Image: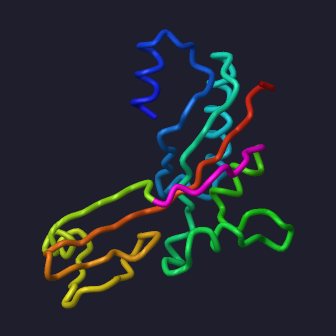
Amino acid sequence: MFSKAIADADAGRVPTVAAALGITMAAEGRGRGLSHLLLRGLREAAASHHLADLVAPVRPSRKAAYPITPIDRYLAWTTPDGRPFDPWVRVHVDLGGEVLAICTESTVITGAVAQWEEWTQMRFPDSGPYVVPGALVPVEIDRDRDQGRYVEPNVWVRHRIRKP
């Protein structure tokens, strides 16, 4: 997003889309409806700048409870009323957002095995995938290369602010 925005600005192109880099809610604020307010605020800010859309890379908030389920299957799950199963994706859809695509490599974190053991307070005695609390997918440990690699997916959501 940054490189595209800079290139567009350098070329004199007028912005048409706002992009959220991330929306993070402190634990004590969760479950109080504040996420709706934050997202509405972003939509209003985009509208005040006469932008057509707001796009957001959304980290599905409940995916960490299902780390071995592929993201495409997880995103296909719904509540009994047909809305998205994931609460954060559901907030976006409830406010008019449209799921555009899955980004399979949204965040990539690599480090030595010792670093991963320090970060996670876990031991990785062998090579292979490990489920780490809070991670959306398993961390891949390669003892021979002394490397742990985590590749987290997300989902891109578009909010139409005004008709194109």
Residue 80 location, quadrant: bottom right
Is residue 53 magenta-colored? no
* Residue 121 shown left or right of residue 78 in the figure: left
Measured as percent of width and height from the top left, residue 84 is found at: 73, 63
* Residue 27 shown left or right of residue 118 in the figure: right
Residue plotted at (64% across, 32% down): 41
* Residue 154 shown left or right of residue 51 in the figure: left
Measured as percent of width and height from the top left, residue 124 is found at: 22, 85
- The colouring scheme, among rainbow, by chain, secondary structure or one colour, is rainbow
Measured as percent of width and height from the top left, residue 16 is found at: 63, 22
Residue plotted at (59% across, 49% down): 156
Residue plotted at (55% across, 62% down): 61
Q: Is residue 142 above or below residue 95?
A: below
Residue plotted at (74% across, 51% down): 93
* Residue 11 shown left or right of residue 143 in the figure: right
Residue bounds of the magenta highlight: 96-104
